Amino acid sequence: MAVRAVAIALLGLVLAAPAALAQRTTFDGLVGCERYAAVEFKRRNPAFRRFVIDRASVAVDRFADKVGSQFVSTIYHGRASYDAGSGAKIVRFLCLHGGVERGPLFVYVLAD
């Protein structure tokens, strides 16, 4: 009887694991925005070095609508550090995120 209960509990854990892995957090979204921005900024400016979002300054707006033809689920905005070879500068950023399946769609920075 105890062996059967343990087997059922293990089966439940195995089946629940993919659901837990599929859950995304704000941290995951911001990491995605940083990675997307780094690729785009490096493509446009070979001197680009680093883009780091200040997690404490981030505001999260749930959007769930289309911008043009793209579905945007969340808008992240706040401050970040942007280093294009001449030293790090504090900038304001905006990241349009398409959700778990699409990931970041657009990142824009403005001088602070």
Image: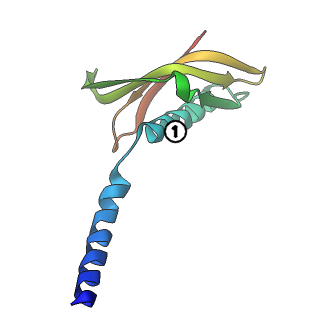
Residue ID at (34%, 43%): 100
Q: Position of residue 54 (x, y in %)?
A: 58, 26
Could you tell me which quadrant the N terminus lies in? Answer: bottom left
For residue 60, above or below residue 112: below
For residue 12, above or below residue 5: above
Q: Position of residue 72 (x, y in %)?
A: 31, 28
Residue in the foreground of this view, choosing between 55 and 107 = 55
Q: Position of residue 24 (x, y in %)?
A: 38, 45
Within-10-Å neighbours for mark 1: few <14, some 14–19, many 20+:
some
Q: Secondary structure at mark 1?
A: helix
31 sits to left or right of 99? right
Residue 86 seen in this snapshot: yes
Residue in the foreground of this view, choosing between 46 and 96 = 96
Residue 94 seen in this snapshot: no
Residue ID at (55%, 38%): 35
Residue ID at (49%, 33%): 33
| Quarter of the image where one finds residue 42 | top right
Could you tell me which quadrant the C terminus lies in? Answer: top right
78 sits to left or right of 75? right
Q: Position of residue 86 (x, y in %)?
A: 78, 20
The residue labelled by disc 1 is 31
Mark 1: which amino acid?
Val
Residue ID at (52%, 39%): 31
Which residue is most to the front?
2
Q: What scheme was used to colour the molecule?
A: rainbow
Residue in the foreground of this view, choosing between 17 and 102 = 17
Count of number-bearing discs: 1
| Quarter of the image where one finds residue 46 | top right
